[in-house]
Image (cartoon, helix red, strand yellow):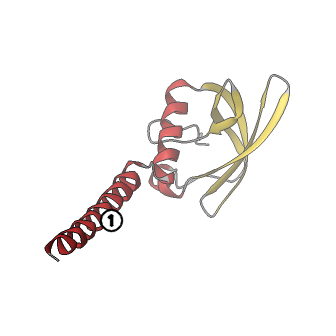
């Protein structure tokens, strides 16, 4: 009878240990994931540091979204950038249409920015 009780206790302890390991593993996995906001900040930082500089035209600025177009090797790109987190860096006298500078990835020209934490391509009039 004692052997059966020890066996049940061992199985219960193993189940609790397994559940604890599963919870700890899940929490570690969650904490190691890069959040979307952090991924976007890293993208902006990389482009600001290593991107190729080009001229662009600001097409529209509305509700924290910059829409701009630029040309790379004869191909015209139209892109947008959500700048709601960068709003303190945006000049208050920004008009919706005009020339700006853009930094883009030379291997993927569609990957571009007009503003980051360390670089601003917006031009004051």
Quadrant of the image for the C terminus?
A: top right
Q: Going 62% across and 64% down the picture, which residue do you hit?
A: 63
Horizontal arrangement in the rendering, residue 41 relative to residue 94 (left or right): left
Say which residue label 1 marks: 19
* x and y, in percent, of residue 78 in the image: 78, 43
Horizontal arrangement in the rendering, residue 22 relative to residue 115 (left or right): left
The image shows residue 52, relative to residue 56, as above or below, that is: above
State how many labels appear: 1
Q: Nearer the viewer, residue 44 or 30?
A: 30
Q: Report which quarter residue 68 is drawn in.
A: top right
Q: Going 85% across and 25% down the picture, which residue do you hit?
A: 74
In this view, the residue farthest toward the left is: 2
Mark 1 Cα shell of 10 Å, populated few (<14), some (14-19), many (≥20): few
Horizontal arrangement in the rendering, residue 85 relative to residue 70 (left or right): left
Q: Going 55% across and 42% down the picture, which residue do you hit?
A: 115
* x and y, in percent, of residue 22 in the image: 36, 60
* x and y, in percent, of residue 82 in the image: 60, 54
* x and y, in percent, of residue 58 in the image: 71, 45
Q: Report which quarter residue 47 is drawn in.
A: top right
In this view, the residue farthest toward the right is: 74
Q: Nearer the viewer, residue 4 or 84?
A: 4
In this view, the residue farthest toward the front is: 1
Quadrant of the image for the N terminus?
A: bottom left
The image shows residue 17, relative to residue 44, as above or below, that is: below
Horizontal arrangement in the rendering, residue 92 relative to residue 23 (left or right): right
Element type at mark 1: helix
Q: Going 52% across and 46% down the picture, which residue do you hit?
A: 40
The image shows residue 64, relative to residue 34, as above or below, that is: below
């Amino acid at each position: 009878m004692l052997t059966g009780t020890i066996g049940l206790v061992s199985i219960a302890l193993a189940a609790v240990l397994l559940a604890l390991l599963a919870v700890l593993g899940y929490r570690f996995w969650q904490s190691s994931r890069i959040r979307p906001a952090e991924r976007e900040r890293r993208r902006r930082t990389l482009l600001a540091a290593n991107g190729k500089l080009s001229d662009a035209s600001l097409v529209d600025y509305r509700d924290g979204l910059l829409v701009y177009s630029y040309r790379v090797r004869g191909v015209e790109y139209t892109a947008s950038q959500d700048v709601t987190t960068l709003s303190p860096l945006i000049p208050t006298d920004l008009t919706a249409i005009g020339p700006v500078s853009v930094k883009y990835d030379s291997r993927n020209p569609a990957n571009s920015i007009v503003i980051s934490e360390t670089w601003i391509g917006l031009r004051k009039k």
